[in-house]
Image (spheres, helix red, strand yellow):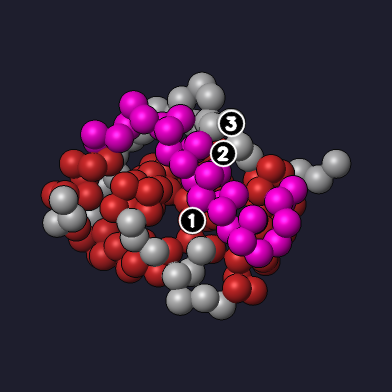
Amino acid sequence: MTSKQDQYNELAYYTLAHRDAAFIHQHVVDAFAAQNADEHTKPIAITFALVGLYLYLEKGFTGRQVQRMHMLLAKQRKEWPKFTPPQQRGAIAAADVLAALPGRDRDAMIRQWAASVWDAWKQSRDQVAALVKKELDVS
């Protein structure tokens, strides 16, 4: 049985090998970070993951666009909000994504995974949206 980290590494390899302009890899990074955050996770990591999921799923940003927003956010802000991780982190995990056939099926599963994780964090949605609007001027 492989660890969560091993599963993430396999997905990272898969998405980095895509070399597509949309940069689907960013969504894997954000979904994994938000799903596996705990009391030891740095606030910046949780913030970036939630901002990335919000921009991807609610604003239609590509992974490349999310990455640019992360860079802008890092330049503008030095203190990061605290988010309380939910008990449940989504019904889909990296192992489920890896079980899908590589290509369209797996890529679609990455989106489903991200949506599952974002839905689990729904209590933080308004805080994330306000941060994005204030710091990145994205409505």
Q: CA distance from mark 2 to mark 1?
A: 14 Å
Taking 5 as reference, is 125 above or below it? above
How far across and down, in percent of the image, does residue 41 sit? 49, 40
Dominant SS in magenta = helix
Mark 2 / mark 1, whichever is N-terminal:
1
The residue labelled by disc 1 is 27
Circle nearer the N terminus (3, 1):
1
Point out which mark residue 36 bears.
Answer: 2
Amino acid under disc 1: His
Point out which mark residue 90 bears. Answer: none
Nearest the viewer among 11 and 37 is 11
Instruction: Name the quadrant of the N terminus.
Output: top right
Q: Which contiguous range is marked in magenta?
A: 98-127
Q: Which residue is mark 3?
A: 91
Q: Secondary structure at mark 1?
A: helix
In this rendering, does residue 129 appear at all? yes
Quick check: is 93 in the magenta stretch?
Answer: no
- Residue occupying the point 49% across, 38% down: 117
Front one among 50 and 17: 17
| Quarter of the view holding residue 101 | bottom right
Residue at point 14%, 56% (across, down): 137
**Residue type at the position of mark 3:** Ala
> Residue shown at 34%/67% (left/top)?
65
Is 80 or 132 nearer to us in this picture? 132
Q: Crowding near pointer 2: few (<14 within 10 Å), some, many (20+)? A: some
In this view of the protein, which residue sits in the foreground, 35 or 22? Answer: 22
